[in-house]
Image: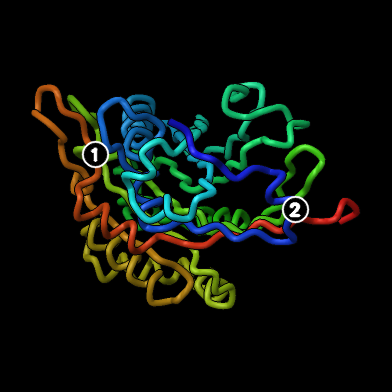
């Protein structure tokens, strides 16, 4: 089964198109519903977590999604069962990782030729990257996966982007859902049992964002001092400061708490626990806008 999906040609017809990433849409992108599903956030987290624990290098996934035409499909996770997603990976060094392109030559089965007017519109929904274990450094610098100024600067730069599809250029306003998975160190079995996750997203209040960016490092130091060496409390305090600023939505999950095992311990797989998935859907749903630009812009 496939959806009747929004195409590039549909967007070109309108001066501006708004798309709803509903709570159900968020939950579908984040979590498998049945065994065998791929390219959801929970799958990407497991791959990235294991890779970083073994190599000490950062890994990144950008999860792109198509958009059904029928507005009713956005209201229920079951109606989104066959939502098409493309999880694009990138491998970095021990300190940073670059955003990967949605490469047409690699994803030619999902993406039609640029000249095809029925090419499906795919846009980024989730931006995941890992932080290697930093136990040898002061906790407030990298501990518990707390975002730093570079992370926030990257989010700000991605919030409003120009994207080109064939001969068409669009201005896209897209407050993607950002996730940092902080490695808890290499262990036997799944690394996710020891990892923590930090979710954050821009609200669109640019003035509040600029104010927060100006005091970002002072805010982190204050959270570090108040936490008295507890890196998980430090992350909770920093997430709260991000929310209070009005610039962000933010949530933190300490080591292993985000997941549950679906099925038996021997044959099951890890998915995001239902109570957390519901909270994430309610917190991080959003509207994105795609504006068609004239050819001379």
Examine the rendered structure and indicate whether residue 125 appears above or below residue 216: above
Q: Which residue is mark 2?
A: 13
**Helix, strand or loop at disc 2?**
helix
Toward which corner of the image does residue 33 lie, by quadrant? top left
Up/down of 265 relative to 4, above or below: above
Assign the C terminus to one quadrant of the image: bottom right
Look at 57% across and 45% down and name the residue there.
123
Whole-percent x and y of residue 49? 33, 34
**Are the residues at dot 1 and dot 2 in contact (C-beta closer than 8 Å)?**
no
Which circle marks residue 271 in the picture?
1
The residue shown at (27%, 63%) is: 236
Q: Nearer the viewer, residue 35 or 50?
A: 35
Q: Earlier in the sequence, mark 1 or mark 2?
A: 2
Residue 227 is situated, as x and y percent measured from the top left of the image, at 24, 66
Q: Which mark is residue 42?
A: none
Residue at (29% x, 57% y) in the render: 252
Choose between 88 and 85: the one closer to the eye.
85
Query: In the image, what residue occupies the spot 32% across and 60% down?
Result: 251
| Residue 24 placement, left or right of 268 | right
Question: Viewer-nearest of labels 1 and 2?
Answer: 2
Q: Position of residue 119 (x, y in %)?
A: 67, 35
Determine whether 90 is above or below 250 in the image. above
């Amino acid at each position: 089964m496939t959806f009747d999906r929004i195409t590039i040609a549909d967007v070109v017809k309108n001066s501006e198109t708004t798309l709803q990433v509903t709570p159900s849409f968020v939950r579908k992108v984040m979590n498998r519903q049945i065994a065998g599903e791929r390219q959801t956030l929970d799958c990407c987290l497991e791959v990235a977590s294991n890779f970083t624990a073994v190599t000490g290098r950062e890994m990144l996934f950008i999860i792109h999604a198509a958009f059904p035409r029928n507005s009713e499909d956005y209201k229920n996770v079951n109606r989104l069962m066959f939502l098409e997603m493309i999880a694009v990976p990138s491998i970095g060094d021990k300190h940073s990782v670059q955003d990967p392109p949605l490469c047409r030559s690699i994803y030619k089965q999902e993406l039609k030729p640029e000249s095809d007017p029925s090419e499906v519109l795919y846009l980024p929904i989730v931006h995941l990257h890992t932080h290697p274990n930093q136990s040898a450094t002061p906790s407030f610098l990298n501990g518990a996966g707390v975002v730093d100024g570079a992370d926030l600067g990257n989010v700000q730069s991605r919030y409003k982007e120009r994207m080109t599809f064939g001969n068409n250029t669009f201005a896209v306003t897209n407050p993607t859902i950002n996730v940092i998975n902080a490695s808890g160190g290499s262990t036997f079995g799944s690394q996710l049992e020891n990892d923590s996750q930090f979710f954050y997203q821009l609200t669109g209040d640019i003035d509040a964002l600029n104010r927060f960016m100006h005091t970002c490092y002072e805010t982190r130091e204050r959270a570090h001092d108040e936490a008295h060496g507890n890196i998980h409390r430090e992350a909770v305090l920093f997430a709260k400061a991000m929310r209070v600023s009005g610039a962000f939505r933010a949530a933190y999950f300490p080591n292993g708490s985000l997941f549950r095992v679906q099925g038996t311990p021997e044959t099951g797989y890890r998915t995001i626990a239902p109570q957390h998935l519901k909270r994430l859907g309610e917190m991080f749903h959003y509207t994105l806008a795609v504006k068609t630009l004239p050819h001379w812009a």
